[in-house]
Amino acid sequence: MRDYSYNLVNKATSILCGLAISVILARYLGVSARGELAFILQSGSLVAIVLGLGLSQSFIRSFRVSPSPATFSQVFTLLLLQLVIFGGLAVIVFFVSDNYLLRYISIVAVATSAFQQVEGIMAAYDIRLKMKVHIGYSLVRLTAHIAMWFLVDPDLFAPVLISVTTALLSLVAYLILTMKPRLKIPSLALVQELYGFGWLPMITTLLVVLNYNVDILMLKVFGTSIDLGLYGVAAGVITYMWAIPDSIKEVLLSRVVRSSDLSRVILPLKAAVAASFLSVLLFAGLGWILVPLLFGTEFSGSYYLIVVLSIGVIPMVFYKILGSSVLAEGRRWFYFASLLIAVLANTVLNFIVIPVFGADGAAWASVITYTFTGSAFVLYFGRLSSRSPLDLVFISGSEWNQFRRLIKFF
């Protein structure tokens, strides 16, 4: 329970800082430029996954087999080598290209890739250190954005630079705090094992992010700049509703790599579902006041999009938590196939509805595919754990009693 409670503090800090940053960016950039930034960051995150080559997912598997500091040191060294190679290419693109979107996406992609991979590695290797560093990362980002708001004229480069710099600072912090065993050149056998295993998790992670972000990418192409800006804010708010299940998922990940007991997933899953449901109800009731108050009246249209997208929050809680367990059990082909179907469906639906309904259509398309993904993982995990899907969805009387005891404990 100590890990769960500490990670909730981490996520609370992340939520508060992230919400404040979203407010600052909305008021600093305005609707259209905020949409442009959302496109840059989401495109960068997609490219970042490809550049990561599935290293963090491969580490989870290798560390489960050989949980030693030597394994960690070799993988961390490989991560730094990737950063040097792809960072050099990004610098070339940044200074050669005349397209500002391509320039910004290139540097965001490399920094985000390093950040994504080291966060994934640390979630399995030292979850408590990850929480501490992430709290510091959130606070530094907030401080930088506050300074930008007061000191820098509105421009896309400033938030892009902050995104890149803070991601790299996080990597430096992990390097300093974890390298008691020094960096170690990885063996050829380990490199072959890591990249041989990592390509499918890498593609799978790409599908995960596409399932979340294909709507933003397609709004850039088929929608208006206003649609993109409003949707970017709505999608950002939805990520805060996933903070509790994400915190539970991260702690579970550090445990499932050391245990094959699937029953340990059930109670945290239901706690995440209950907490997410309450957060959805809370924002649905108060969001019509909070959105214009925080982001400005020009973003009032984001409230409806948030309400629609929140319908898909609960199904995706099941995916996020059960998916980690399914992947840790080595069932990667099911994980891959279900996400591939979801992304293809999401893409086709967005292609159809965005030209007609704009951001509203994109939101409903996402809800449909989120529901499919969550349902698929509930059914599959139920079969894997020999449990009824209803047993995974509904909270029993004894589980309510456990929740009450935990609440009193806190």
Image (cartoon, rainbow, N blue to C red):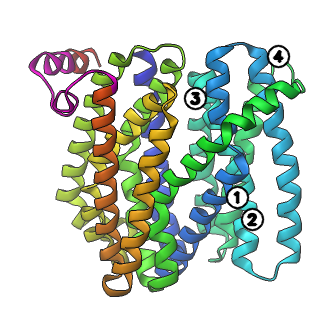
Q: Position of residue 25 (x, y in %)?
A: 52, 67
Res 129 seen here: no
Q: 110 or 2: which is nearer to us?
A: 110
| Residue at left offset 82%, top offset 16% | 181
| Residue at left offset 40%, top offset 30% | 248
- Residue 360 position by quadrant: bottom left
Return the disc, 4 or 3, that comes first in the chain's sequence.
Answer: 3
Q: Which mark is on residue 109?
A: 1
**Above/below status of 2 relative to 147:** above
Cα distance in 3D space between marks 2 and 1: 5 Å
Q: Which mark is on residue 106?
A: 2
Q: Position of residue 338 (x, y in %)?
A: 41, 48
Q: Quadrant of the C terminus?
A: top left
Cα distance in 3D space between marks 2 and 4: 32 Å
Q: Which residues are magenta?
A: 384-404
- Residue 359 position by quadrant: bottom left
For the residues labelled 2 and 1, say whether their Cβ atoms are less than 8 Å apart. Answer: yes
For the residues labelled 3 and 2, say whether their Cβ atoms are less than 8 Å apart. Answer: no
For the residues labelled 4 and 3, say whether their Cβ atoms are less than 8 Å apart. Answer: no
SS of the residue under disc 2: helix
**Above/below status of 24 relative to 84:** below
On screen, residue 170 versus residue 9, left or right, reads right
Q: Position of residue 236 (x, y in %)?
A: 43, 59
Q: Which residue is mark 4?
A: 181
